[in-house]
Amino acid sequence: MTRQSSRILIVEDSESLAQTYAGILEGDGHEVKVAGSGEDANAALESAAEPFDTVLLDLQLPDCDGLEWLEGRQQLTSDCSVVVITADGSITRAISAMRLGSYDFLVKPLSPPRLLTTVRNAIERRSLVEKAETANRLTSRSSFHGFIGKSPPMQAVYRAIENVAGSKATVFITGESGTGKEVAAEAIHRAGPRARKRFVALNCGAIPENLLESELFGHVKGSFTGAIADRVGAAREADGGTLFLDEICEMELNLQVKLLRFLQTGMVQPVGSSRPVSIDVRVICATNRDPTREVAEGRFREDLFYRLAVIPLELPALRDRPGDVELIAQHFLERFAEQEGKTFDPLGPEIVKELASRQWPGNVRELQNLMLRTTVMNAGPHLTVADLPAERRAGAQMAPRIEPTAQAPAHASQFAEPRTLAEIERAAVEAAISRAGGSIPAAAKELDVSASTIYRMRSRWEKLERRSAPMAAPQDFN
């Protein structure tokens, strides 16, 4: 059995006995401090740089009664193992001390083997208690760096984030849309040594192909049409911190080559520049696609995939997180109620059962949008199942279009009940912009995203609308 050393405080008024105990314990590899009175013991406990693991307490002290001293420090038996030292005539008092939480008692005179065995057992017991407390803390966390949930799959995610946070290795996050991949990336950043530096997120699917290289690596003035000033680029903005590349599988193959070169060399070369720049940045990327399939079908470089996927992290779908739907729904209800200036009762068992029965193809983002709509469309304070928007399933008919009114701009709500995840996302964003009186920064604050994210989303929607718009009929010149 491997011996464990610890920090031990001996509270004993007999200097000869105290030194004898100290010599025995120090010979066993322990760090020992001696206090000759209750006052000295108080000073030792308060000035200790690290807490003591074990306290050996004599009940006969010159300035106080050891039992009364222990009773006045009830937290002590929770913080360390207390072993009472007693004379034959005070065993009853020793038992009283154990009722106060002491681990064991020793009867004078002490034999070295008995002292060592008791202390070793006390150390092992304390170690087991600490491990149990740690395990209990890890399995009962209901939130973690922006995540809400205490299900076993999420506890595993929390532990994985803590394990990888201190590393410099690249992390490849996968999971369905709406599972919180950017939240996970930012949690890794905030839990690690780079937390004081910047976290820069770049959505590779929301930026036009011809601008993505410039957004990532920067450019010099005049390097292309529209380059009216130098641009640093996301990689250099994140120098010393973390660069998060979302929707990495949307990146074109020619830019994948340049990204691979950057990862291998740590050098970035702005568009139009002949001078590479060295930076120190940790890269985290994410995708809602199957990256191995993207590699197999030739849309993603295999060498880049293996360079990025040093540490894979898969986020579970909401339907695979038992018990978390209630926690997340209640969290969003309280948050949106505060934003809307309303008051709602806690979610009742019928609503919780209904929410738990849904499949949530849009995951947490879908649940967030549902709770936002529920909050906006109901006065409160009590909610019933009938107050929840109906669940949307694949193949369901699209809701009839609502004509715009003076109070609601046409873009604010095109559908009475959005059907797809993209429609839900757009409806929530545009509703927030409408409530904010057209202010995108205010809407971004409400939705807890950056304003640039909303600008990119609107740009993408405009592009899609232009693509899907019918071509104008040819003019008749006759």
Image: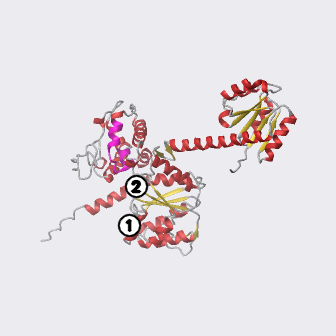
First in residue order: circle 1 vs circle 2: 1
Q: Amino acid at mark 1?
A: Arg
Label 2 neighbourhood size at 10 Å, few (<14), some (14-19), many (20+)? Answer: some
Label 1 neighbourhood size at 10 Å, few (<14), some (14-19), many (20+)? Answer: few
Q: Quadrant of residue 355?
A: top left
Name the residue furthest left: 478
* Residue 251, horizontal then vertical, whole percent: 41, 67
Q: State whether residue 402 is above or below residue 237.
A: above
Name the residue furthest right: 16
Determine the residue positioned at 24% across, 61% down.
Answer: 469
Q: Which mark is residue 444?
A: none
Labels 1 & 2 near each other (Cβ < 8 A): no
Question: What span is colored magenta in the figure?
Answer: 351-369
* Residue 25, horizontal then vertical, whole percent: 79, 43
The image quadrant where one finds the C terminus is bottom left
- Is residue 353 on the magenta stretch? yes
Q: Quadrant of residue 350?
A: top left
Q: Which mark is residue 455?
A: 2
| Visible residue check, residue 187 | yes
Q: Which residue is mark 1?
A: 293
| Visible residue check, residue 222 | no
Give the side of residue 461 with respect to residue 153, left or right. Answer: left
Name the residue furthest bottom: 274
* Residue 359, horizontal then vertical, whole percent: 33, 47
